[in-house]
């Protein structure tokens, strides 16, 4: 397909914007100025001020002398870019690929290949953009051509027609000044000095000559304008590859309606995903309400999937968060992140259950959608003896253990998060307690095992070692007690309860 | 007369089937290793497609219940299936499960903030056929909540274990079985030091269509070993009225 580009040049971007914000400035000459080396230098000029001869780059004090009653407004760096970003996002209605003109920072570039027929041809397309922007208060110049470079040139310097027919960009460029090639000042000065006032006077010269005199960048700009070099536009909004829209005749207000809409969108999306062997990882449902508000809900899956009913269940959990207010007129379902879906071989007999079982993965997705990913975890054995650190938490369901679980030493089925101090009576030095008091209850120890000494990991924290005893009281309750530290050391030893055995 | 009895038996069988009890398939007895306790259940089969409720008032009882459930999980998870453990205040130490032949890495823990979330997760998990079992720790379970869980179980066949922390025995739930596991002094050979195998008093307080009973059970390292039928009343039940914590 023949590619076509539109360049939109906002002739007085900042001045127009200021006039929209403050209509009372309509009859007042004003300029924007920014400090530079201790002086105020003019960065943008309003139409009235420019009729007095005020130009950008002037000192504000000089301009005030030329133009009495000039209002000098403060300029903020980066303001044109923010304005263009907003305008560019608005222009997405005309083409999905909208880029900011980085050279002049006062225009937009649109890749309109295959878009113009929707507005009845290129003429109608340009007319629509101009009149819409004009009704908002922006004066613009547009041009459409085969390359972004020539569109830019014609929009800024063209005098004949903004519609450059396919293949006609060289002819259109011939009569223009060299400035139309998006060149910087030193090169332009050289060109003027050599008497090149029009592009046609040097366009036919050998490349090697031009490169020697004006540099590589000059040749690149020329080639981009003619179309021998490709120019890539960086779109403001990267179009999502997998996206579905559903516009509603009547605004949707009910849960049933939203469910139906989601189901329809998912059906279309999943069919496309399936056809390409892809699966959804994240999904965003954007609901445009008739009062202009936008409601978004997100879902995520732990593995790529295009299973309609599963994805629908994930969205179902989020429907409560959608406030339809007066009604939703447009649903857009995007899949910003998709992955190759692993197609498992159909198993003839029974599938082996486990952590990677499909139904389990779906359950985890649902829980993650409702409660959050962080609540789901597993424990793997760690190569450490300190009880609190002997298990390693993992949030992944696929991570494999690097070591095996130790079964040689007894470990309690219930472990207290922090050991609780207890009072004991024990024979020194090495005997288990005779009895201990925990939560006001006195437990007389009848059987005991130990001690099992576990040293503190001194490279992580300071403190005493622990001597663990497994004890059983008269009733049969089994406990895990430990003494922290040696008897009679400088540090006071203490007894703690740390867990309950089965 | 005979025809009538046959009709009754047939109806009883049907009701059991609807309630999730599988009839004992001829020649293929699915034992879970609980020995004589299994005979308390209708058809002498441990109901896997059911909700089992455990009363754990004291921390010692809850530790014993964890051990008992771990012993059951060892059989239920034999085929490599996973298990979900939902709780708000979990104290289970995963490393200890390997002592009961359960692979702790195949248990998916979900520690959430509210009891409501625990119940929601439990219901969702019970509907998931890929799991072997679901363990939930709650402080209270109402009739309606238990009914929902039972309905979820009936459609999927996942075994549900509910650890109830309140001792309210009058609270009616539709659980198939209500257990109370209390630790008992372990038995060691004469003159040997240390502790023996964990020994419990297993009380089946309620079995639907079965015979409640009290048993003494031991985890003999690899499997359950029944010691004898308990005659003595539970010493732990007296302490239950005591406020904990």
Image: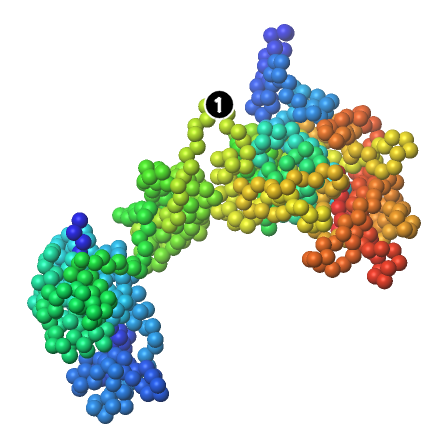
Q: Where residue A309 sits: x, y (%)?
A: 41, 37
Q: Secondary structure at mark 1?
A: loop
Residue drawn where x is 9% and y is 68% of the image: A200
Give neighbour class at mark 1: few <14, some 14-19, many 20+ (Cα, 10 Å).
Answer: few
Q: Where residue A406 sits: x, y (%)?
A: 70, 40
Callout 1: chain: A
Task: Report the quarter where the C terminus of chain A lies.
Answer: top right
Residue drawn where x is 68% and y is 33% of the image: B101
Residue furthest out toward the top: B2
Image quadrant of residue A312? top left
Q: In this image, A429 relative to A398: left or right? A: right
By what rule are the colours in the image chosen? rainbow
Residue furthest out toward the bottom: A65
Q: In this image, A56 relative to A435: left or right? A: left
* Residue toward you, A203 or A473: A203
Q: Where residue A32 sits: x, y (%)?
A: 28, 81
* Residue at mark 1: A349
Q: Is residue A90 visible?
A: no
Where is B29 relative to A485, above or below? above
Where is A132 relative to A289, above or below? below
Q: Is residue B22 visible?
A: yes
Q: In this image, A367 relative to A9: left or right? A: right
Where is A263 relative to A129, above or below? above
Q: In this image, A105 relative to A402: left or right? A: left
Image quadrant of residue A445? top right
* Residue toward you, B236 or A34: A34
Residue drawn where x is 62% and y is 29% of the image: B78
* Residue toward you, A423 or B106: B106
* Residue toward you, B202 or A273: A273
Q: Where residue A265 sits: x, y (%)?
A: 33, 43
Residue drawn where x is 14% and y is 77% of the image: A194
């Amino acid at each position: 397909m023949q590619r076509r580009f539109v360049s939109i040049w906002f002739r007085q971007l900042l001045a127009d914007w200021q006039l929209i914000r403050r209509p009372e400035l309509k009859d007042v000459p004003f300029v924007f100025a920014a400090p530079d080396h201790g002086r105020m230098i003019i960065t943008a000029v309003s139409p009235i001020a420019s009729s007095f001869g005020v130009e950008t780059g002037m000192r504000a004090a000089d301009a005030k002398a030329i133009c009495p009653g000039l209002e000098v407004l403060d300029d903020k760096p980066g303001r044109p870019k923010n304005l263009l970003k907003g305008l560019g996002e608005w222009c997405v209605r005309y083409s999905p690929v909208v880029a900011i003109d980085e050279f002049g920072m006062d225009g937009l570039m649109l890749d309109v290949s295959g878009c113009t027929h929707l507005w009845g041809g290129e003429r109608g397309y340009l007319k629509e953009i101009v009149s819409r922007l004009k009704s908002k208060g922006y004066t613009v110049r547009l041009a459409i051509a085969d390359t972004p470079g020539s569109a830019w040139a014609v929009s800024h310097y063209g005098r004949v027609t903004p519609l450059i027919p396919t293949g006609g960009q060289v002819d259109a460029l011939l009569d223009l000044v060299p400035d139309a090639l998006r060149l910087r000042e030193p090169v332009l000065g050289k060109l003027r000095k050599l008497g090149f006032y029009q592009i046609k006077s040097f366009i036919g010269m050998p490349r090697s000559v031009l490169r020697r005199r004006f540099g590589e960048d000059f040749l690149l700009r020329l080639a981009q304008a003619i179309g021998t070099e490709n120019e890539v536009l960086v779109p403001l909004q990267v179009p999502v590859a997998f996206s579905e829209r559903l516009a509603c005749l009547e605004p949707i207000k009910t849960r049933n309606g939203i469910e139906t809409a989601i189901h329809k969108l998912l059906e279309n999306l999943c069919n496309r995903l399936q056809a390409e062997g892809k699966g959804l990882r994240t999904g965003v449902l954007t609901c445009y309400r008739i009062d202009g508000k936008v409601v978004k809900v997100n879902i995520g899956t732990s593995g790529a999937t295009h299973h309609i009913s599963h994805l629908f269940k994930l969205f179902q959990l989020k429907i409560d968060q959608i406030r339809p207010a007066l009604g939703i007129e447009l649903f857009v379902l995007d899949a910003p992140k998709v992955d190759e879906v692993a197609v498992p071989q159909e198993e003839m007999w029974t599938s082996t259950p486990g952590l990677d079982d499909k139904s389990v993965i779906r359950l985890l997705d649902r829980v993650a959608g409702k409660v959050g990913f962080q609540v789901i975890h597993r424990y793997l054995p760690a190569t450490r003896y300190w009880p609190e650190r002997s298990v390693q938490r993992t949030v992944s369901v696929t991570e494999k253990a690097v070591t095996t679980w130790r079964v040689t030493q007894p470990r309690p089925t219930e472990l207290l998060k922090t050991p609780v101090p207890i009072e004991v009576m024990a024979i020194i030095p090495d005997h288990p307690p005779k009895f201990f008091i925990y939560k006001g209850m006195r437990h007389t120890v009848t059987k005991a095992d130990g001690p099992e000494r576990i040293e503190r990991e001194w490279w992580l924290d300071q403190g005493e070692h622990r001597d663990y005893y497994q004890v059983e009281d008269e009733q049969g309750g089994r406990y895990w007690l430990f003494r922290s530290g040696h008897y009679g050391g400088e540090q006071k030893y203490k007894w703690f309860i740390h867990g309950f055995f089965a | 007369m005979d025809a009538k009895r046959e009709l009754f038996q047939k109806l009883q069988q049907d009701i059991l089937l609807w309630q999730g009890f599988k009839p004992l398939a001829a020649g293929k007895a699915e034992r879970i290793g609980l020995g004589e306790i299994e005979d308390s259940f209708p058809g002498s089969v441990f109901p896997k497609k059911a909700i089992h409720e455990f009363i754990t008032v004291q921390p010692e009882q809850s530790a014993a219940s964890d051990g008992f459930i771990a012993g059951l999980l060892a059989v239920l998870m034999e085929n490599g299936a996973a298990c979900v453990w939902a709780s708000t205040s979990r104290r289970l130490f995963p490393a200890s499960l390997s002592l009961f032949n359960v692979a702790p890495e195949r248990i998916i823990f979900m520690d959430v903030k509210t009891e409501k979330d625990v119940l929601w997760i439990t219901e969702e998990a019970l509907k998931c056929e890929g799991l072997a079992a679901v363990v939930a720790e709650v402080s209270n379970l109402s009739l309606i909540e238990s009914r929902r869980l039972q309905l979820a179980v009936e459609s999927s066949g996942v075994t549900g274990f509910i650890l109830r922390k309140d001792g309210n025995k009058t609270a009616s739930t539709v659980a198939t079985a209500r257990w109370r596991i209390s630790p008992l002094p372990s038995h060691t050979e004469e003159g040997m030091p240390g502790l023996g195998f964990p020994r419990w008093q297993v009380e089946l307080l309620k079995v639907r269509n079965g015979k409640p009973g009290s048993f003494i059970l031991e985890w003999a390292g690899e499997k359950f070993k029944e010691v004898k039928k308990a005659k003595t009343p539970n010493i732990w039940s007296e302490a239950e009225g005591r406020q904990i914590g």
